Image (tube, grey):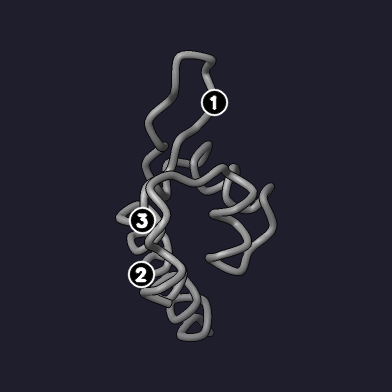
């Protein structure tokens, strides 16, 4: 996965693909404040970094585990 994160910035769709979730899932995580939003460029588009992707992968792993631990 480290190789995949060499690009400087990513679009929301690219990040969703890298994390392995639907774009709407990622946007719902942001809306529900489960994860913080990315920076925005001058046009208002989200600009994600490799660090953001790593953070989201960690969240997804923990979130998936939480859901499995629920009765």
Instruction: Give percent across and percent down for residue 16.
Output: 60, 56
As drawn, which residue projects farthest toward the top?
42
Whole-angstrom CA distance, mark 1 to mark 3, is 16 Å
Disc 3 target residue: 50
**Disc number at residue 59?**
none
Instruction: Give percent across and percent down for residue 4.
Output: 46, 69
Q: Residue drawn at (42%, 68%), measured in percent from left and top?
A: 57
Instruction: Give percent across and percent down for residue 56.
Output: 41, 60
Disc 1 target residue: 45
Q: Which of marks 1 and 3 is nearer the N terminus?
A: 1
Using the image, determine if residue 28 lies above or below residue 45: below
Quadrant location of residue 28? Answer: top right
Q: 65 and 49: which one is in front?
A: 49
Q: Which of marks 1 and 2 is nearer the N terminus?
A: 1
* Mark 3 surroundings within 10 Å by alpha-carbon count, few (fewer than 14), some (14 through 19), many (20 or more): some
- Report the side of 68 relative to 62 (left or right): right
Whole-angstrom CA distance, mark 2 to mark 3, is 13 Å
* Mark 1 surroundings within 10 Å by alpha-carbon count, few (fewer than 14), some (14 through 19), many (20 or more): few
- Secondary structure type for disc 2: helix
Q: Residue drawn at (61%, 69%), measured in percent from left and top?
A: 20
**Are the residues flagged by discs 2 and 3 in contact, CB closer than 8 Å?**
no
Whole-angstrom CA distance, mark 1 to mark 2, is 23 Å
Q: Which of marks 2 and 3 is nearer the N terminus?
A: 3
Mark 2 or 3, which is nearer the eye? 3
Quadrant location of residue 61? Answer: bottom left
Q: Residue drawn at (53%, 85%), measured in percent from left and top?
A: 71
**Are the residues flagged by discs 1 and 2 in contact, CB closer than 8 Å?**
no
- Secondary structure type for disc 3: helix
Q: 21 and 41: which one is in front?
A: 41
**Disc number at residue 58?**
2
Instruction: Give percent across and percent down for residue 12.
Output: 58, 44
Using the image, determine if residue 37 lies above or below residue 64: above
């Amino acid at each position: 996965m480290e190789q995949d994160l060499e690009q400087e910035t990513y679009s929301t769709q690219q990040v969703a693909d890298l994390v392995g979730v639907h774009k709407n899932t990622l946007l719902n995580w942001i809306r529900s404040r489960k994860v913080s939003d990315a920076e925005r460029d001058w046009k208002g588009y989200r600009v994600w970094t490799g660090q953001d992707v790593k953070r989201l992968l960690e969240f997804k792993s923990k979130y998936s585990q939480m859901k499995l631990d629920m009765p």
